[in-house]
Amino acid sequence: MLIAMLLLASLDRSSAAPGWTLEPAASKLTFEVTQAGGEVKGEFRRFDADIVFDRNDLPASKVRVVVDILSVTTGAADRDQELPKPDWFDAARFPKAVFDADRFEAVDDRHFVAKGTLALRDLKQVISLPFTLDLQDDTAVMDGRLELDRNAFGVGQGAWAASDIVGRKVAVIIHLQARRKT
């Protein structure tokens, strides 16, 4: 989910390979899943990213997003207390989720796909994250959305592996803003 987490994979840089600094107050990593037939929205409030991105030099671009699993919140105290437990994220053993993207494809000059590995719990999966990138002066805004199967990452084990109460598909929505490093 996190990923999304994350990905931020966006941002233009010069040939000197400057990176980008995430602006946390303007960035969000959220998710949506169904539970008992209704929609549940949540977010990860703490995450960081190491971004080097040049849409004119995609082979030199890379992004690493690290998400603090204990920062998950859904607005329901009972659910928020369960998510860090072993049946869900197992935050005691796996406190971070990491998305490493090192391959990028341009769809056009505003739409891209980041390809990389998402590590969540003790599992890793290759994922593709489509995103848009808007640049204005030294500010970049990246928006992406992808759907993950929570079972592919072991999120929801035992009786929770079934999708009769909590859906298997999780939409991860990423909105990142970053400033070009000087």
Image: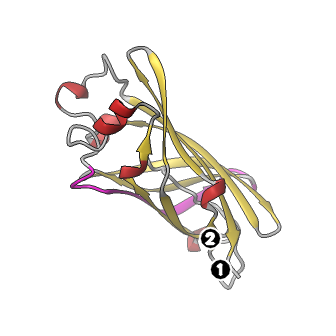
Q: Decide which of 35, 9 is in the foreground and name it.
A: 35
Q: Residue at x 72, y 79 (%)?
A: 14
Q: Which mark is on residue 21?
A: 2
Instruction: Give the number of the mark in front: 2 or 1.
Output: 2
Farthest front residue? 77
Q: Decide which of 48, 18 is in the foreground and name it.
A: 48
Q: Secondary structure at mark 2?
A: strand
Q: Specify the segment rendered in magenta.
A: 91-109
Q: Residue at x 24, y 47 (%)?
A: 90
Q: Eyeballing the image, is 178 above or below 175? A: below
Q: Residue at x 67, y 78 (%)?
A: 181
Farthest bottom residue? 16
The x, y position of residue 173, in whole percent, is 56, 41
Q: Decide which of 125, 45 is in the foreground and name it.
A: 45
Q: Residue at x 72, y 61 (%)?
A: 140
Q: Eyeballing the image, is 73 above or below 142? A: above
Q: Which mark is on residue 18?
A: 1
